Amino acid sequence: MKTNNAPEPRPAHVLNSSLARISIALLVGLVSLESLAEPRHVYLTWQGDTSRTMTVNYQTFGSPQASTVYYDTKSRSGRHEEYRFMAVGYSHQLEGLEDGRWIHWVELASLTPGQTYYFIAGDTKHGFSEERKFSTIPSGSRKLRFVTGGDMGVGPAVAELLQQAARLSPAFGVVGGDLAYANDVLTNYTRWDAWLDHWRTNMVTPAGCTIPMVLAIGNHETKSRMPASPTNAQFYFTYFAQTRDRSYYARTFGDNIAMFLLDTGHVSPHDGEQAAWLDAQLTAYRHVPHRFAVYHVPLYPSHRAYDGSASVKGRQTWLPIFDQHRLTAAFENHDHTFKRTHLLRENKPDPNGTLYLGDGCWGMGVRKVDEQRRWYEAKAASLQHFWCVDVTRNRVEYRAVNKEGRVFDVYPPNTAGARAAEKVYETLKDSKP
């Protein structure tokens, strides 16, 4: 039988003790909520000029907050009132994400090329991130270094490879798709948290600079077996301030590098608008001495079949454009292997052709390659790695680096360290997947 008896009154000392415990619990809860309100993830992207802007991305939890970044050319040790400059951005949410986090994008503009800036993100009510720093891209023809790869995931090898990449002090890092392997599933948000934590923790140069990211889209940024659409890559477009809702874009870095981040059919088809855009962009940047394409599915795969549909589509649609404009190199991914091709033009070896490098093994486990090299391959092996690329006005040097920091391939062959790298490659190439 259900009863509704009123509780007996408690003695005053018990009541006071209970209230004290409740007050302490509430206080602890408020402190926890307050710490949750401080930015958890702080990372850097570009939406435009890489020498004069930087976009600070960060995330907060709880109630809406102001999107502000305080910054200066000198360290202010996190004391917001001492920074000479402040920028205001805006925040948004990913609809349906259960923790209701806010993603903030704040673009810093009118920056000085080649300058180091110190910054904090957050607001005065909820708190700020720790002070971090970055360097803008120098203008002109100064030597630039970047690192690139793809197919990362969140396993232990990612941290090791990112640490090795950061030790080389690159100006920026390029990821050619398949970042967190979250498949745009809302309940996989913890994979994005882990991936962002990897980058925040490990992609810091020896001088303490946070390394900006430049991202292309891959198949694991989208929902499986769904029609190509920006709505099937919500994390990618909501988390990273790059191009709003378009999955391909261009960036320049100084006077010597133009880079084209492409979509191998995940949100936008190879042909149509994207192909027309690529042709127009390569025409517009024809004066830039070194032009690179970065994309996910390789035109020249090293593990998957040569006649795979996306690879065939890429060769049919993009090869004539690459060849016409004499693309310097293409960074390919998706196959979880190491690959360097011969110089190729019109789908055959040509000393004046394009170099194709890949194939996306910056953290994920390796896959097998054929025992006999394919006709287009100079080298192929089951090796985790990233590429370190040094660019000057008249030359580009490429180095493949593994998680132990060993350089095992160097191109061109007359580059310093090429012979030593060849010996390392011979000891590593037959490693079993």
Image (spheres, helix red, strand yellow):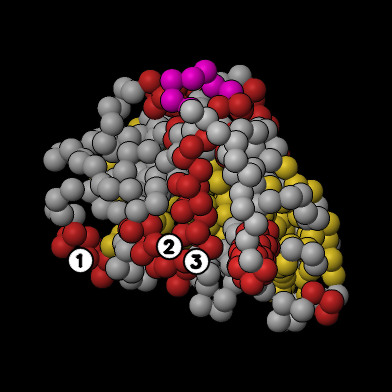
Query: How far across and down, in percent of the image, does residue 291 sit?
Result: 57, 47
Residue 181 in view, yes or no:
yes
Residue 375's place in the image compared with 130, above or below, is above
Cα gap from disc 2 to disc 1, whole angstroms: 24 Å
Residue with the mark numbered 3: 201
Q: Earlier in the sequence, mark 3 or mark 2?
A: 2
Q: Categorize mark 2 by other alpha carbons within 10 Å: few (<14), some (14-19), many (20+).
A: many
Of 141 and 155, the residue lying toward us? 155
Of 376 and 127, the residue lying toward us? 127
Residue with the mark numbered 2: 162
Query: How far across and down, in percent of the image, does residue 378 sit?
Result: 27, 46
Residue 401's place in the image compared with 186, above or below, is below
As for residue 430 lying within the magenta part, the answer is: no
Residue 27 in view, yes or no:
no
Q: What amino acid is found at the position of numbered circle 3 in the picture?
A: Thr
Kind of element beneath mark 3: helix
Query: How far across and down, in percent of the image, does residue 22 sit?
Result: 63, 63
Stretch in magenta: 222-229
As for residue 224 lying within the magenta part, the answer is: yes
Q: Categorize mark 3 by other alpha carbons within 10 Å: few (<14), some (14-19), many (20+).
A: few
Residue with the mark numbered 1: 423
**Prevailing secondary structure class for the magenta stretch in the rendered image:** loop
Cα gap from disc 3 to disc 1, whole angstroms: 32 Å
Of 86 and 276, the residue lying toward us? 86
Cα gap from disc 3 to disc 2, whole angstroms: 9 Å
